[in-house]
Image (cartoon, coloured by chain):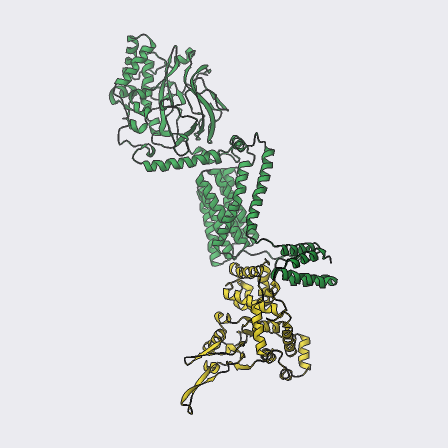
Amino acid sequence: MLSPKSPKRLEHVVGATGSVILGKEGQIRLALACLLAKGHLLIEDLPGVGKTTLAHALAQLLGLSFQRIQFTSDMLPADIIGVSVFDRDSGAFRFHPGPVFTHVVLADEVNRATPKTQSALLEAMEERQVTAEGQTRPLPEPFFVIATQNPSTQIGTYPLPESQLDRFLMRIELGYPDRAAERELLAGVDRREVLAGLQPCLSPEELLTHQKAVRAVQVAEPLIDYVQALVAQTRESPDWQVGLSPRAALALLAASRAWAWLEGRDHVLPDDVQAVLPGVACHRLHAAGESAARLTPTEVATRLIEAVPIP
Amino acid sequence: MAKSKPQAVTPSQTWWLLAAALSALLPLTPHVPYWLSALALTLLGGRAVLNRTQRRLPARFWLILLTFAGSAGVLAQFRTLFGQNPGVALLVLFLALKPLETRTRRDGLAVIFLCYFLVLAQFFFAQSIATAAMTVATIVAVTAALGSLADGRARPADLLRRSGLMLLQAAPFMLLLFVLFPRVQGPLWGLPRDAFSALTGLSDSMAPGSISNLSQSDAIAFRAKFSETPPRDLLYWRGPVLTEFDGRTWRPEGRLALPRLAYAPQGPLIEYEVTLEAHAKRWLFALELPGNLPSDSLMTGDYQLLARTPVTTRLRYSVTSHTAMAAGREESSAVLQRALALPGDFNPRTRALGQGWRDQDKTDEAVLEAATRFFLTQGLSYSLTPPLLGRHGVDEFLFESRQGFCEHFSGAFVFALRAAGLPARVVTGYQGGETNPFDGYFTVRQYDAHAWAEVWLKDRGWTRIDPTALSVPSRISQNLAAAVPAGSPLPLLTRADLAWLRELRLRFDAVANTWNQWVIGYNPERQREFLNRLGMRAPDWRQMTATLAVLAGLVLLGLTAWALRQRRRVDAAQRAWLRLGRRLGRRGLPRTPWEAPLAYADRIAVRFPESAAEIRAISALYGRVRYGNLDPVLLDELKTRIARFQP
């Protein structure tokens, strides 16, 4: 069991990633929390804001193997999970594992592929194993998918349906960097060089231990009350079209634990819940009313937070 | 400060407003002119169409025109714009017009309040249980409409549920106000219209058929509450006394101002309370003969009990009676003279009969004896549909048709006695009645209407003789149904073959009576009586108001406790934290209910940088104690540090 001091090492991960992705500490922490909670991450933003770099940096700093899959509209499920090829030497079919057999998968522009291909990845994410030609093969541990998605208003995309979105523990947006960060980016050294020079801070085994420790972070009765009150509000209030599911409530709790662990605590505070709420809840919630479509995730989360007193 | 734009009413809110207006208007439609009802419903319908098609509301000009035209119509109908009926008519008109100019929430509120007001107007016209139930339904609908104005997105079922719940929560206050609010004598807002609806009842004259008509009505004449119900043959409820006869119709003595003669009480005293239905006449009914008179009543020379004004609302009075009394032994000769008067040229055979009795027997008692014997043996029968009688009605009844109702019996008996020289007169009223098994009230209905005779004997004064009882004893010993031939058309309640219907009706009567006694009839006396029973001796309005305030406070406390019961018990750490929030709130940094501990600490740290470290430590400690493992030592530390924290 790790002591609450252990997350100091994780702070290094946050700091080092921050040296690559400038001015995005909040998003980096959320991404790391998502990884610690054994969830998957969906990054939704315009091309060129650093989605790939973030995934790459995280993988490298945690000493994990990394594969990038660029989704295209002509992609097939086999392109992800692998294919069996007849081997003349042995006279049998041999499975060639697809790019999904790795620790960190960057599924780039997942909404460019057809729904069938998307669902192949999403099933692998959920089951943490791949079944091909009647044989089930486990995926490596830890297994972490960072999918990126262009905003669905763009042409030629297949937006993920709600049921698929629900498989991602969090959805975050990177957004444009602020002026100072962008200036540093423009004036400084090439980020790819920085990335290449990153040294792992953690071993995969250590990461697994952290994941285990996160699950042991204490959640007290009043905190469960709070999570329940939040979820109940989304179900009862006319502000929302559809309320949060029990799975969403579990996700909220898991993410809050990871956040508390990152913050160096062995118990979850309402602060942690509120911190992860935009990432966890917003892709599962649709605000009702005329102006709802224009609300940003932060605004949606604020609306929910301010509607529920902390018990 | 920028003026905010008035909030527009959404279509769904408009539907609610229209529904509320409709529910407030519909019960009033029978009570306003027909053209106005039609106009109001048309206007609401028009607004509904506009709402459905989302078209523009009519221009102000048309609304002003409609307002003036409608008001002119009301003026033409009632000749005035003031008073109860024109007032209600005008409000109906305005409520129907208002939705046509309802664009903003504020207009919507005006519609709602107009609805609430008109709901009350229903009580001008009726105050029955059904009316009350209808008003409750209307108030639920109107309150739901008010709710929709506050929360435009709520579902209709939720709005109705909320509205019902709010009314339920208000019910204890309503009850308290009802019971304890100091009462004033008489109805608050004039006479309800239904006071005049119960106009069936005895009239002040009696011709063949006038009482048998009443036998078809099972409407309630009055109710009485006895401590012990007297035997049936004593239950003669005295009403109008008829002395003058013109050959066909009996009328009361109108010309002589009769002095009231003393009478000596005899026999046991019967105490009871009568609740008389409105009948628009002055008579009060009491058992023969009343002893202590009810307040605000008087007794005439022929022992009729009269109210000072016609009874136009349900009236409750206490009275006592002595069933055996010698009255009027010193009757004036003028009165006796009039009690002997017979119109000329009528009923020669009966005149001869009476003359014959007098010739045969010299004493009055003997004549009376002969007359009684005649009625016993003549073979007269009781009928609800006696044959029509001609000019010599008494003769035809006694010697030819021999079928009649109590008015025939009493009229013929008095006529015959007068012919024999005995002063006699007809007394009308009610005979009998029955106890409602469900509430114990003794109920007298219109079909219990009866007429009997009173004869003056020198040493006994006015003596009651019931000729109907002589010929048809079952009318008195049992009831009407027993006295008439089988198959006669009878009111449902008197028929033995419809027991279940009878029971249902009696149950309903009992409920309606409870309502009348305790809700409609809750007057200052009732209030005093009730509060006495609750242990408040001689309550005056100050004491009542104080009690009202205290009890209302208690009810409020109870409701609050009930609402708080849902909330989890605040634990010690949270109490300390909330205390800190309140204390800093006084310095302009209140904790918002949704603010998490560390976030609040950050906000405080920004405001009081020198205390930043301490408040961060406190909030972390609070987090540990409340959301981590509860350590009593840490809890004490938290309490101390919060108490000491003074930025």
Q: Is residue B232 above or below residue A29?
A: above
- Residue B96 in percent (x, y) is at 49, 48
Q: In terms of depth relative to the viewer, which is nearer, A252 or A140?
A: A140
Q: Is residue A38 above or below residue B32?
A: below
The quarter of the rendered structure image containing the N terminus of chain B is bottom right
User: Chain A is which colour?
Assistant: yellow
Res B477 seen here: yes
Q: Is residue B346 above or below residue B495?
A: above
The quarter of the rendered structure image containing the C terminus of chain B is bottom right
- Residue A172 in percent (x, y) is at 57, 72
- Residue B154 in percent (x, y) is at 51, 56
Toward the top, the furthest residue is B362
Displayed quadrant of residue A211: bottom right
Chain letter matching colour green: B
Q: In the drawing, does residue B38 fall left or right of residue A277?
A: left
Q: Is residue B512 above or below residue B147?
A: above
Q: In terms of depth relative to the viewer, which is nearer, A246 or B460?
A: A246
Res A296 seen here: no
Toward the right, the furthest residue is B610
- Residue B287 in percent (x, y) is at 41, 22
Toward the bottom, the furthest residue is A89
Q: In the drawing, does residue A41 fall left or right of residue B271?
A: right
Count numbered badges in the picture: 0
Q: In terms of depth relative to the viewer, which is nearer, A232 or A219?
A: A219
Q: In terms of depth relative to the viewer, which is nearer, B496 or A122?
A: A122
